């Protein structure tokens, strides 16, 4: 009888730990996505791109429409945050189901996070970029312009051909951003999980 109760207690603790880690992973993914979103908007500004270009391209690729407005930027940002939350959940899953993996997260969270970022870049960003966004940009008229407009006029604009010429830089910058996302996500997952369930 006592052994059965002990077994139930262990199973309950493992389940609670798993749920705490998974929830922490989802929250950490959202926070990591917000941090990367801020960097993306800053990088666009520094590169001379209209602010929100990444999100415009994301929505255009998903909807196959070239609707360049503030609503499209907001939709793209929301999609990015949703994807970050889902990726945080996926990245934290091995640590939620395995106590041994969870314990190793304390020492190796930075390495795991950087590796997870490289994996996200290779498995998600590159296929979306080369399979969807590049063909979309190439299908647009070479004279097409992506611009950011405000009530007083055009704030920034870039020709699609110029943007295509920047794709190599964008792809390598995205590697760094994805590595940072993985790092932030797993570091926060560990910190949040420890705060919820203790060591």
Image: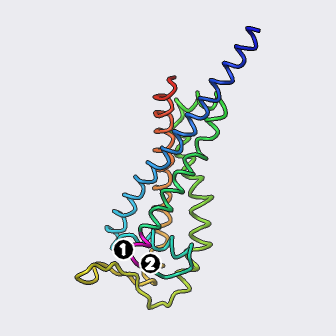
Q: Is residue 57 above or below residue 8?
A: below
Specify which label sits upstream in the sequence, 1 or 2. Answer: 1
Q: Is residue 59 visible?
A: yes
Q: Which residue is mark 2?
A: 163
**Farthest-out residue, front:** 1
Q: Position of residue 22 (x, y in %)?
A: 58, 39
Q: Are marks 1 and 2 in contact (CB under 8 Å)?
A: yes
**Farthest-out residue, left:** 152
Q: Is residue 28 above or below residue 162?
A: above
- Kindly report the secondary structure that dominates the magenta region of the rendered protein: helix
**Disc 1 from disc 2: Cα separation:** 8 Å
Q: Position of residue 177 (x, y in %)?
A: 46, 56
Q: Which residues are magenta?
A: 69-73
Instruction: Find out whether residue 72 is within the magenta segment.
Output: yes
Q: Position of residue 143 (x, y in %)?
A: 44, 91
| Residue sitting at x 46%, y 28% | 195
SS at mark 2 in the image = helix
Q: Which mark is residue 49?
A: 1
Instruction: Find out whether residue 180 is within the magenta segment.
Output: no
Q: Is 169 positioned to the left or the right of 45 in the image? A: right
Front residue of this view, candidates 67 and 176: 67
| Residue sitting at x 55%, y 83% | 138
Q: Which mark is residue 173?
A: none
């Amino acid at each position: 009888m006592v052994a059965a109760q002990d077994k139930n207690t262990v199973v309950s603790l493992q389940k609670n730990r798993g749920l705490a880690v998974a929830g922490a992973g989802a929250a950490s993914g959202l926070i990591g996505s917000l941090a990367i979103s801020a960097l993306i908007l800053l990088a666009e500004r520094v590169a001379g791109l209209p602010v929100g270009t990444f999100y415009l391209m994301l929505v255009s690729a998903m909807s196959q429409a070239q609707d360049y407005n503030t609503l499209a930027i907001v939709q793209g940002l929301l999609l990015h945050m949703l994807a970050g939350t889902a990726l945080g959940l996926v990245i934290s899953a091995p640590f939620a189901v395995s106590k041994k993996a969870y314990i190793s997260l304390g020492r190796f969270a930075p390495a795991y996070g950087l590796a997870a970022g490289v994996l996200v870049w290779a498995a998600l960003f590159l296929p979306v970029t080369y399979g969807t966004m590049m063909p979309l940009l190439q299908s647009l008229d070479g004279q097409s312009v992506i611009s950011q407009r405000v009530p007083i006029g055009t704030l920034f604009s870039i020709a699609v051909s110029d943007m295509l010429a920047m794709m190599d830089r964008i792809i390598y910058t995205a590697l760094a951003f994805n590595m940072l996302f993985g790092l932030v996500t797993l570091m926060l997952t560990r910190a949040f999980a420890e705060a919820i369930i203790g060591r």
